[in-house]
Image (spheres, rainbow, N blue to C red):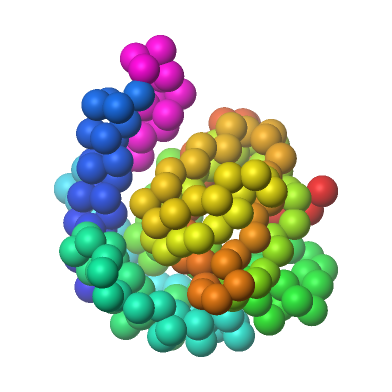
Amino acid sequence: MLKNILDELTLLYSKELSFVKSNFPKEDTIILKHLKFIVGKLEKLKNQLEIIEIKSETKPVVSYLSQISLENKADDYKMIINHLKKLKDKLFWRYGYQAPSQEMIEKYAYTEIIGPEGPIYSEEMIIGFVLLAPDFYYPKHRHSQIEESYLFLTGKTIYNKQAILAERSFILNKAGKVHELKSDSDQATLILYTWINKGAGSLKDYQLNLE
């Protein structure tokens, strides 16, 4: 199943790269470079796949996965969400913060699919899923040495108290950019995230901090 997820991730990001190439100005090179890096590394992983053993751990918010409907979703989104639902109990879900609030404990978690902590091993990038319960405010935070992108698998999500992002929206957070999220009041938010290291440290050692 992990190989299937890798194939689906490659397809999703390849489509996103093609869309950006066709619809955005040529001078907008940051997003293009980011997506080209992801697609290139995914293609490399397909040829050099390394699966590592990880411990599984769930969080309360994972129960909301069963409530995410596949109705009216594109086939590529249906496949990736369906595989996540089947794998959810075998993954390591985490908060990433040293002292999460009670609301965060109940309504937030993320899991790494590709990265130094696996289950698909990579030292060069992390790809995983962020899950927010309905009506959850994910406070301001930044990643000082991490370039991060969000691909929204569900909608509607408020980004930085301004943009309402629908399903299939793509956002790039440059290293150091402050950002925040607010999930829809009626449905959970599921996000595909990618981290690319822009500093000297290791992705494995990176510590999350709220503002």
Q: Can residue 110 be seen? A: no
How many marks the image carries: the answer is 0
Residue located at (34% from left, 14% from top): 26
Question: For residue 41: magenta?
Answer: yes
Where does the image place residue 81, in percent across and percent down from the top left?
Answer: 33, 70
Q: Where, by quadrant of the figure, is residue 146 drawn?
A: top right
Residue under the image location 70 percent in, 64 percent down: 137
Is residue 200 shown above or below 82?
above
Which span is picked out in magenta? 25-42
Residue 120 is situated, as x and y percent measured from the top left of the image, at: 35, 60
**Residue 192 versus residue 105 in the image, above or below:** above
Q: Quadrant of the N terminus?
A: bottom left
Tell me where residue 159 appears, x and y as whole percent.
61, 49
Q: Is residue 186 toward the left or the right of residue 113 in the image? A: right
- Between 57 and 181, the one lying in front of the other is 181
Q: Is residue 105 left or right of residue 47?
A: right
The residue located at (62%, 33%) in the rendering is: 175
Q: Main secondary structure of the magenta part?
A: helix
- Examine the rendered structure and indicate whether residue 8 appears above or below residue 107: above
Residue for point 40% across, 12% down: 27
